[in-house]
Amino acid sequence: MGEINSFFTMLSSILWGWPMIILLLGTHVFLTLRLRFPQRRLFTGFRLSVQKDKGATGDVSQFGALATAMAATIGTGNIVGVATAVALGGPGAVFWCWLTGIFGMATKYAEGLLAVKYRVKGSDGQTYGGPMYALENGLGMKWLAFFFAIFTIMASFGIGCTVQANSIAMLASESYGIPTWIVGITICSITTLVLLGGVKSIANACTVLVPFMAGIYITGCLYILCMNISFVWPALKLIVVSAFNPAAAGGGLMGTTVMMAARYGLARGLFSNESGMGSAPIIAAAAQTRNPVRQALVSSTGTFWDTVVICALTGLMVVSSILAHPDISYDDGAALTKVAFAKIPYVGTPLLAFGILTFAFSTILGWCYYAKCSVNYLMNKRAKRFYLLYRIIYIVALFFGSVVSLDIIWNLADIMNALMAIPNLVSLLLLSGVITRETNKYLWGGRLDEESSLT
């Protein structure tokens, strides 16, 4: 098993190495420039996300689609992952992580646009879309769409299921002494109840859970920043300066280079917000919207909240805590986060535990929906039977993930996520002309309120 895990570790490091980072970041920058900075319409996206698009077709509200996408996107990586990037890449990693969020908004915008433009009605009357439909209906690459759907299903058992259940179970066991098997049964029971209600039940749960969990976590970060108030500005300067000059960290605080800061910051940002991975547009396709661009703007706000706000706050909190408390060890990202939150009297550790628990559970719900759409794409009229089988296996996998060590599964999850990104990036780059035409027509042409015949 050790040799197998070493192989998967090596493969994961290759797939998430510089070629993938350059491809993803390059796509972010390319789409930002070609679409003439759709990030400029961020506040329009905020407004549309809370408005009901009356008369528009779709299965869930635009906010419900956004909340479900964010439920799957916002996870333990936003808490522990950013701290790990700081531990490995130094304070400058936070700057590069934040940068991926700024440019990644254009990619998330483009993904949402294609998802709505090429969405279809399934035999069950529900709306389906995502990279697999864009690849088949937009480019005629059904074979590549097939692989994307397969990779999504496989990834759902990794990053969307077992590793999240394991995070919850280990947290409950280490912090409160609750046996992992009891946690596993509890997770399986609650997840089953939500999944029985279908996409609307998932969206409703996420609509309540996501704003609440994000609000609680952000409040905790802001409290720590208030405690470290005299170190916030020095931390911010250190983050920006050390992104280009790690020696500015002082005495080789992290012993890093510019390349290390950029690599870990970019990788964590890209992995955290999932812009370009192809997961979020699957739920964006189900949104009730009158034209593709409206939902595209709403989708782009997800990357803003995930990376530009939550990841940036985490990074600033971690770096300011290091400056305020030099005794904190920064060798372990998870330990670093725990120590920082422990500085909040009485409620700090429970607050972090609650954040990890809710972030992980919401990810479980979001990824199950992604897999359902992939099953529907592969099986079509037989999808209902196969999805029942999938849900049974998914619930069993949740319990399995709660009680065993998951080193290999973590690596497999990283590999599947990378393999998802490749066909999705192909669709974004080859269909960038379509994305540009739709953007020019509805966004820059002043026709944002028009109804599209495709929706």
Image: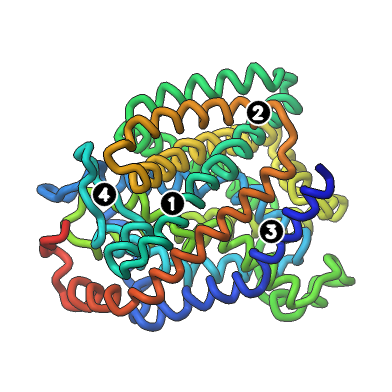
Q: Mark 2 points at which residue?
A: 402
The mark lying in front, picked from 1 and 4, is: 1
- Camera-side residue of 258 and 405: 405
Residue type marked 4: Ala
Q: Is residue 27 left or right of residue 233?
A: left
Counting from the top left corner in percent of width and height, residue 200 is at: 30, 34
Q: Which of marks 3 and 1 is nearer the N terminus?
A: 3
Viewport quadrant of the N terminus: top right
> N-terminal of the two: label 4 or label 2?
4
Closer to viewer: mark 3 or mark 2: 3
Q: In this view, does 183 lie above or below 141?
A: above
Between the C-alphas of marks 4 and 2, the distance is 33 Å
Q: Which mark is residue 28?
A: none
Q: Residue at x 35, y 64 (%)?
A: 135
Q: What residue type is labelled 1?
A: Ala
Q: Mark 4 points at which residue?
A: 287
Instruction: Name the spot of residue 315 as percent of width and height, x first.
Output: 65, 58
Going 42% across and 55% down the picture, which residue do you hit? 146
Mark 3 or mark 2: name the one nearer the start of the chain. Answer: 3
SS at mark 4 in the image: loop
The quadrant of the rendering that contains the C terminus is bottom left
**Percent x, y of residue 202:** 37, 34
Q: Which amino acid does label 3 sit on?
A: Ser
